[in-house]
Amino acid sequence: MSTHAHPAVEATIEADPDVPTVRIVREFDAPRELVYRAHVEPELVKQWLGPDSIGMEIDVWDMRTGGEYRYTATRDGEEIAHFYGSVHRVTPNERIVQTFGFEEMPDAVSLDTLVFHELPDGRTRLEGLSVVYDFESRAGMLASGMEVGVQEGYAALDRLLASLQGKADGA
């Protein structure tokens, strides 16, 4: 099993040696409802998702059961990647189940489940599990820069959550 773990501020990324899955776990210093909002509200998602060097143009972001999403990653004003998926089940503040597709790697579609766990002291643990068809597809996912995108994106999410909490506290 390959594991990337640093201090608690970084996500743990695990690739199961027996099943073509990737599991990502990360804790946030913010309440579960706020972490959930940052995943379903497009104006918030644009502020944190992906690596720092990539921008995001959202075409559709309908995070409800039966919804869909489609967005384009940009760098220096140029389109570099296209992502899309179907939203299968949303349980507000608890779980999102969706597909995740990458037009540039059409065979690497995953089924992703995100679970938002409420922790003591207003903290949240986010657990994500991605299941792909085969090990080759998973290897492509991992080689695509996913780890950088996850780590940098979640660091940006930390900053966004702190900012949102500051506004809520009247700071």
Image (spheres, helix red, strand yellow):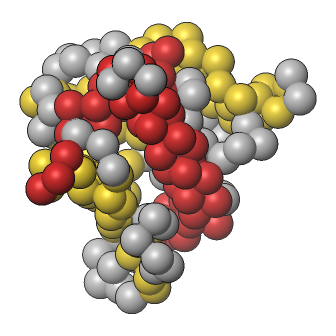
Q: Is residue 16 above or below residue 66?
A: below
Whether residue 67 is visible, yes or no, is yes
Please state, as top left, top right, bottom left or bottom right, where the N terminus lies in the image: bottom left
Q: Residue furthest front?
A: 171
Please give the name of the residue rendered at 33% of the width and 50% of the height, measured from the top-left corner: 29
Q: Nearer the viewer, residue 14 or 26?
A: 26
Q: Quadrant of the C terminus?
A: top left
The tally of labels here is 0
* Residue 13 at x, y percent in the picture: 43, 70
- Residue at x 45%, y 85% (from the top left corner): 2
Quadrant housing residue 31 = top left
Q: Residue 137: where, in percent of width, then height? A: 50, 62
Residue at image x 49%, y 15%? 43
> Relative to 123, is 90 above or below?
above
Q: Between residues 111 and 49, which one lies in front from this camera angle? A: 49
Camera-nearest residue between 47 and 19: 47
Residue 32, x across and y down, in percent: 21, 39
* Residue 157 makes an appearance in the image: no
Q: State whether residue 159 is above or below residue 19.
A: above
Q: Is residue 147 above or below residue 99?
A: below
Q: Is residue 141 left or right of residue 72?
A: left
Q: Position of residue 121 (x, y in %)?
A: 17, 53
**Residue plotted at (48% across, 30% down):** 163
Snapshot quadrant of residue 30: top left
Task: Name the one closer to the observer, 81 or 24.
Answer: 24
